[in-house]
């Protein structure tokens, strides 16, 4: 049994009870190519046949799985009952629900993993949803499925101590790689070469990548670089007057980091920073500080974004075209509430209140004419009365070259 898995399953029972659901049902088929995003939080290993992992509001945990998966789940010690099947899952799921859900005057509430707004809470495929509806048809559980997004969001978002240990280590490893990149990068190097160096350092440290490997890190130098989620260029090279920008994330023991750092490339006969670059850095740094000051339990995410966005615009820069921050955990973009403007594409996510022990990024940037993109990104932990920095803030723009 993993202590982390056990802690998250205990947490899940409390979340189910608080949600008003009778049970939380994670219903999956073969998981070798991914499966439901919530699975790594509650299960060590994978599943082969159709499987139902059930956590009741009472705290009882039952797994209905194919007979060849049953021994591994029993050995884990994470489940109070493991029910193996051979020919079909239907009858055993029905029996488990009858035992776990009391026959009350009100209709039962079965929380399952679908969501309009949160991709990490939307792990139930349409095919499996239709199969579940077929299994429940004609029983007292027909038409009783509700969204489990408050359960999955809480489970991913509210970090237990072991998760925070891993996140802190991921941040420290990322900061060390940034230091190595800063010492290595120099005039004439291409974005692609800097990208390859950073990836070599990630692999040398035995770490994973926080997002798709072909785009981690994002590397930008100068005004002609592909800003955003573009790929590093072999043709664009570090030159005097450029801003060199990296967006880098690593995985340590299954937990992610997501940070951005910048350097200025020295210009001949001008040892300091140009005024426009200094102004840009001060505006970006100050906007992140304003976001951090606003961040606290209970505040809706859009208000935190608004604090940073207003500061940046008041400083004379265009507003950024994305959210100020997202949650980080098992993945760099870990679902749940976001620190985002009230735009259609974010759905209801910006209205979700910030919660204690969530981890967020605070990130934004500006384009400096003739120099390139200046962006910073930090990671913070939500505390009782605000937030604390998990990353060592970049408080000055280092000069290279």
Image (cartoon, rainbow, N blue to C red):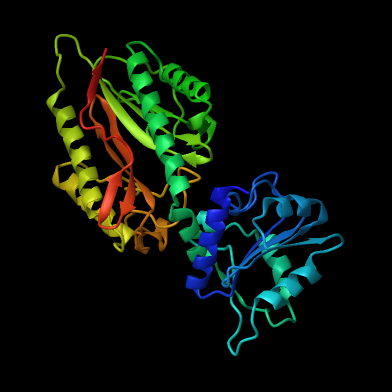
Q: Provide residue 127's location: percent of width, then percent of height.
A: 70, 61
Q: Can the viewer see residue 48?
A: no
Task: Point out the image quarter for the C terminus.
Answer: top left
Left/right of residue 234 with respect to residue 380 in the rendered view: right
Above or below residue 229? Residue 109 is below
Count every numbered label the image shows and give the total. 0
Residue 147 in view here? yes
Vertical placement of 135 versus 159: above or below?
A: below
Closer-to-camera residue (329/239): 329
Q: Position of residue 75 (x, y in %)?
A: 72, 51
Q: Is residue 22 or residue 146 the one in the foreground? A: 22
Q: Position of residue 343 (x, y in %)?
A: 35, 58
Q: For this rendering, which residue is in front, 399 or 77?
A: 77
In the rendered structure, the answer to whether residue 192 lies left or right of residue 139 reads left
Residue furthest toward the bottom?
Answer: 105
* Residue found at x 14% / y 18%: 272
**Residue 365 location, x and y as percent?**
28, 38
Determine the residue positioned at 22% across, 39% down.
284
- Residue drawn at x 77%, y 55% is 70
């Amino acid at each position: 049994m993993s202590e982390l898995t056990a802690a998250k399953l205990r947490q899940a029972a409390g979340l189910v009870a608080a949600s008003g659901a009778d049970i939380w049902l994670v219903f999956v088929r073969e998981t070798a190519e991914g499966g439901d995003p919530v699975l790594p939080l509650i299960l060590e290993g994978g599943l082969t046949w159709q499987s139902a992992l059930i956590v009741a509001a009472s705290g009882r945990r039952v797994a209905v799985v194919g007979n060849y998966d049953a021994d591994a789940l029993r050995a884990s010690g994470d489940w109070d009952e493991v029910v193996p099947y051979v020919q079909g899952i239907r009858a055993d799921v029905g029996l488990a629900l009858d035992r776990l859900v009391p026959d009350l005057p009100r209709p039962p509430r079965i929380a399952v993993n679908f969501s309009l707004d949160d991709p990490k809470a939307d792990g139930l495929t349409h095919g499996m949803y239709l199969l579940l509806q077929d299994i429940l048809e004609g029983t007292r559980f027909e038409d009783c499925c509700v969204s489990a997004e408050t359960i999955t969001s809480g489970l991913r978002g509210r970090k237990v101590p072991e998760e925070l240990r891993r996140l802190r280590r991921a941040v420290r490893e990322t900061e060390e790689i940034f230091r190595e990149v800063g010492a290595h990068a120099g005039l004439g190097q291409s974005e692609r070469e800097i990208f390859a160096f950073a990836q070599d350092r990630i692999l040398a440290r035995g770490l994973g990548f926080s997002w798709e490997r072909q785009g981690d890190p994002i590397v930008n130098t100068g005004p002609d670089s592909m800003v955003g989620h573009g790929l590093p260029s072999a043709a664009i090279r570090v030159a005097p007057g450029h801003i060199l920008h990296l967006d880098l994330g690593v995985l340590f023991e299954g937990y992610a980091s997501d940070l951005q750092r910048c350097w200025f490339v020295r210009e001949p006969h001008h040892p300091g920073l140009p005024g426009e670059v200094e102004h840009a850095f001060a505006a970006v740094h100050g906007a992140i500080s304003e976001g951090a000051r606003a961040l606290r339990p209970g505040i809706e995410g859009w208000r935190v974004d608004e604090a940073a966005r207003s500061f940046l615009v008041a400083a004379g820069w265009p507003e950024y075209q994305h959210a100020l921050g997202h949650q980080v955990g098992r993945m760099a973009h870990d679902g749940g509430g976001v620190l985002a403007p009230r735009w259609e594409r974010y759905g209801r996510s910006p209205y979700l209140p910030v919660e204690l022990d969530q981890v967020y990024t605070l990130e934004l940037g500006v384009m400096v004419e003739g120099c390139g993109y200046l962006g910073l990104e930090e990671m913070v932990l939500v505390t009782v009365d605000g937030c604390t920095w998990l990353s060592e803030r970049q408080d000055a723009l280092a000069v290279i070259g």
